[in-house]
Image (cartoon, grey):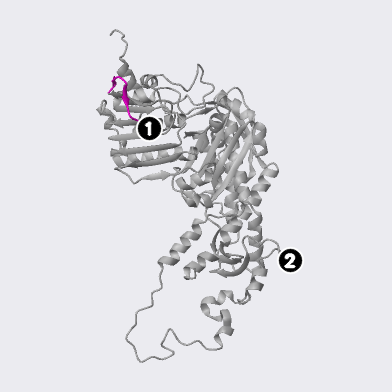
Amino acid sequence: MAIKQLSETLINQIAAGEVIERPASAAKELIENALDAGATRIEVATAGGGKTLLRVSDNGSGMSPTDLELAIRRHCTSKIGDALTDIRTLGFRGEALPSIGSVARLSITSRTATASEGAAISVTGGRTEPVRPSPANVGTVVEVLDLFFATPARLKFMKSEKAEAAAISEVVRRMAIAFPKVRFVLSGSDRSTLEFPATGDDRLARMAQVLGKDFRDNAIEIDAEREEVRLTGFAGVPTFNRGNSLQQYAFVNGRPVQDKLVLSAIRAAYAETIPQGRYPVAVLSILIDPALVDVNVHPAKSDVRFRDPGLIRGLIIGAIREALTRGGARAATTGAQGMMRAFRTEAYRPEPRRAQAPWTAAASPYRPMQFDEPARGFAETPQAIFADFAQPSARAAAAAAETKAPNGSGGSSFPLGAARAQLHENYIVAQTEDGLVIVDQHAAHERLVFEAMRTALHSRPVPAQALLIPEIVDLAEDDCDRLMAHAEELLRLGLSIERFGPGAIAVRETPAMLGEMDASGLVRQLADELAEWDTANGLAGRLEYLAATMACHGSVRSGRRMRPEEMNALLRQMEATPGSGQCNHGRPTYIELKLADIERLFGRS
């Protein structure tokens, strides 16, 4: 068969298969064009999940009639010069508009600030109509009708209208987080209006609009820099987590990305603080020299490649862990909110009256209190566990004094307050200056023990046990080279390896903490990790996992009665230990209720 040149329409339809995968892809490209044009207001309207209608209106710089003619041609763009090493805009390929026009009914109306009237152009299934005058405000309106009508086979692969509409919403949310100075409005017949007013330089306020106000209350700021790469953003406390990773947002030079290196680094940073199957909430922005990152690796521009991926991964992990350490003993506010909801839903309902003999004091559950009962305090059977504790006092001043700093200077209160009681031999109730705290004694002490063990683990070489017969592991030569390049680091972790010929590694010692183990499997796992990330964190992770297991078995058990001084000592240790707001399994170690919340429960406010 003879080789022939494909038609321009067919070329554009092939490109559309890569650039425009679904309505959300078209929305992303059009919003990026609006942002590159300097828009401060972007409105998106949809119908039929974006398949029937997708309209993006902006107040950007607009286009002249000449620009309109070029805009719908492939590889025509105003955003880059002759090189791809200095890309500072979201779009740069010049493929989006011609790709959309080849598979849909596309119309563009635009006007510049200096023009007396606007201009419009239409493209239907790749067939272009001449530019014509049209009334328009300054800016651009792009309308896409019947997406994929020219390639009906693509429509069979579309999801439901609801799913496609949700995908467009997610695109708008990501763009809104990246550009807080821009007002976004999303509306249409298939959705309720979603509006994000501009927040200026207050990025956290915009994040709260998108992720909910709970994120503002449970986020820790991140600002770190390493080798001229800057990382900013906010990371949620570990106990503020979700059932999927949809609330992990990453941006590179303002570009929303879904890069596996970044997402993997976020997961590693929260390693032993999040329960399995749960995901942290984080918004990270990486500012880097455009020459050090390649954004031209995927038509959708959602993936990037860093020149030094190890630097980026290390920066993210280190910055998040430092932020969590700085956050100290901090649990998510959602725990208190859940408790408030639980109290409100369990309304008091008295037991129904039963037919019985005439009332007697012995028969009634509401018998009058005897004068000697207050003196008995906690002598009643249900409250006998409090018998050894100090009796409650109505002297608020004295109670508050116990939560003050021990130097008596009237300084700041202890964040976790002073212990007041132990419930069910597992929960410590403490009074703070403005509320109360309920602590899970086992979970809290488990975290304290683990942090002590982890500190010891990283402060000195890990004890090793010699193998009676060295284990020989056959590997590819490249894997052997990578392992030997990290041999000194592995030796500090108790793993001693040597080169054994061109394609093998000899394991002579393994970490004593791991006991009997599959040395060959460990080495192969480390080789795979080094090949992908150029870091050998797997062994350290296994040692920390073992330390977490040992901490679980060595901590204060549930069901143990604690003296007041023991409870207060535990509270003070929690305040001094980073990450003590959650146990090694990611569950919260305490829940705090503010006095204002308690008063609302009793209708006092």
Regarding residue 229, the answer to whether it shows in the image is: yes
Residue 220 image offset from top left, x and y in percent: 57, 47
Above or below: residue 380 compared with residue 216: below
Q: Is residue 132 magenta?
A: yes
Question: Splitting the image into 4 quarters, where does residue 393 fall?
Answer: bottom right
Q: Which residue is mark 1?
A: 137
Circle nearer the N terminus (1, 2): 1
Question: Splitting the image into 4 quarters, where does residue 24 fall?
Answer: top left
Residue 507 image offset from top left, x and y in percent: 62, 33
Q: Please state, as top left, top right, bottom left or bottom right, where the N terminus lies in the image.
A: top left
Q: Residue at x 54, y 25 (%)?
A: 476
Label 1, secondary structure: give it: loop
Q: Which kind of residue does numbered mark 2 sit on?
A: Gly
Question: Splitting the image into 4 quarters, where does residue 322 fall?
Answer: top right
Q: Count neighbours of disc 1 (C-alpha within 10 A) and say few if under 14, some if 14 to 19, many if 20 or more.
A: some
Q: Is the C-beta separation of discs 1 and 2 under 8 Å?
A: no
Instruction: Say the numbered circle drawn on residue 576.
Output: none
Q: Is residue 138 magenta?
A: no
Q: Which kind of residue does numbered mark 1 sit on?
A: Asn
The Cα–Cα distance between marks 1 and 2, rounded to whole angstroms, is 68 Å
Residue 2 image offset from top left, x and y in percent: 29, 7
Comparing labels 1 and 2, the label whose residue is closer to the camera: 1
Above or below: residue 518 compared with residue 12: below
Above or below: residue 414 compared with residue 64: below
Label 2, secondary structure: give it: loop
Above or below: residue 130 compared with residue 25: above
Q: Is residue 280 found left or right of 223 in the rendered image?
A: left
Q: Is residue 555 found left or right of 22 in the rendered image?
A: right
Q: Which residue is mark 2?
A: 408
Magenta residues, as a range? 125-136
Residue 34 image offset from top left, x and y in percent: 42, 31
